[in-house]
Image: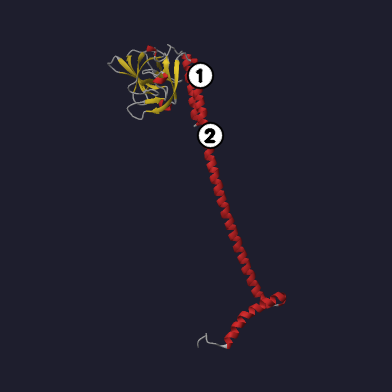
Amino acid sequence: MNFFTFDVRKILFVIFAIGLPLLLVNLQRKSEDTLLVLKPFTLASGLVQKAYSSFSAGVRGTTGLYLDLIDIKKENRLLLNENQELRAQLGALTELRLENERLNSLLQFKQRSEMELLAARVIGKDLLPDHNTITINRGSAQGVNRHMAVITVGGVVGYVFRVETHTARILLLTDRYTAIDAIVQRSRARGIVEGTGGDDGRMRYLRRDEDVIVGDLIVTSGLDNIFPKGFPVGTVISVNKSRYGMTQEVGLRPVLNPSSLEEVFVVLNANHEEFAAEELASHLKSTEALEATEVSDL
């Protein structure tokens, strides 16, 4: 038999099924405490409401936590950017302080010296392995000429070998084509300092019987009034005497690290200035103190 065929009993059943809950709810409003039959419905309704309340509270809590995490992430990003900016400012201030200390040291050296000095800034370095050179921001327009000595507070840098209008190329002490007349400060033994193309140099044409030992300081001889007399060049690190030769070859380490130079002096006129040992020690001490300060800041 088809269930959907017209039947009075079915209609009455549907009306009863729908109308009874409505009637019970209506009766609940009138006398909720007297009808025990409504307890299961009210209990089920309370459980549903409680579950919905817990679910909605969880959703609100999760949503609030997510929004808080978004705010924290944004604040963290802002703090990181601010920290980076402050570190950059601190680095710039540190660099300015170190530069001011270097320039102050150069100024004091120039004021104490009788030489005619031209301050210059290093603006370039030779990348070719065959040469050790630097470029400075001074040229013929400022009175720079070829073969002029280049020094700094701590010692010899090299000399000018190519001049342009507003720039000049400096052949460093370590270049293999460099030749500087020098003497051993302790024994006054004389020779020619040459570069090796690496980090060190050598002193050649010393007689075999000349007194040279490891640790001796090599200084400029002051001949031709190019370099000031007695200015530091390097320290002896090795002494080699051939068995049958008439000369000896001395290895030396320059007192300066050319790769760290930022400011130098071009000696326009040495005025035959001679540096005493005490004055030389004072220059070296001030330079070492400045380098130690830079290393500690890094």
Where does the image place residue 54, in percent across and percent down from the top left? Answer: 61, 63
Q: Secondary structure at mark 1?
A: helix
First in residue order: circle 2 vs circle 1: 2
Where does the image place residue 253, in percent across and percent down from the top left? Answer: 39, 22
What residue occupies the far top of the structure in this picture? Answer: 272
Where does the image place residue 65, in percent across and percent down from the top left? Answer: 58, 55
Where does the image place residue 111, in percent across and percent down from the top left? Answer: 50, 16
Q: Is residue 236 visible?
A: no
Residue sitting at x 55%, y 44%: 78
Compared with residue 247, is residue 30 higher up or lower down, i.e. above or below? below
Q: Nearer the viewer, residue 219 or 239?
A: 219
Q: Nearer the viewer, residue 247 or 11?
A: 11
Residue sitting at x 50%, y 15%: 112
Q: What residue did someone put label 1 on?
A: 108
Q: What residue did someone put label 2 on?
A: 90
Label 1: few (<14), some (14–19) or many (≥20) C-alpha neighbours in 10 Å: few
Left or right of 92 in this view: 193: left
Number of marks present in the image shown = 2
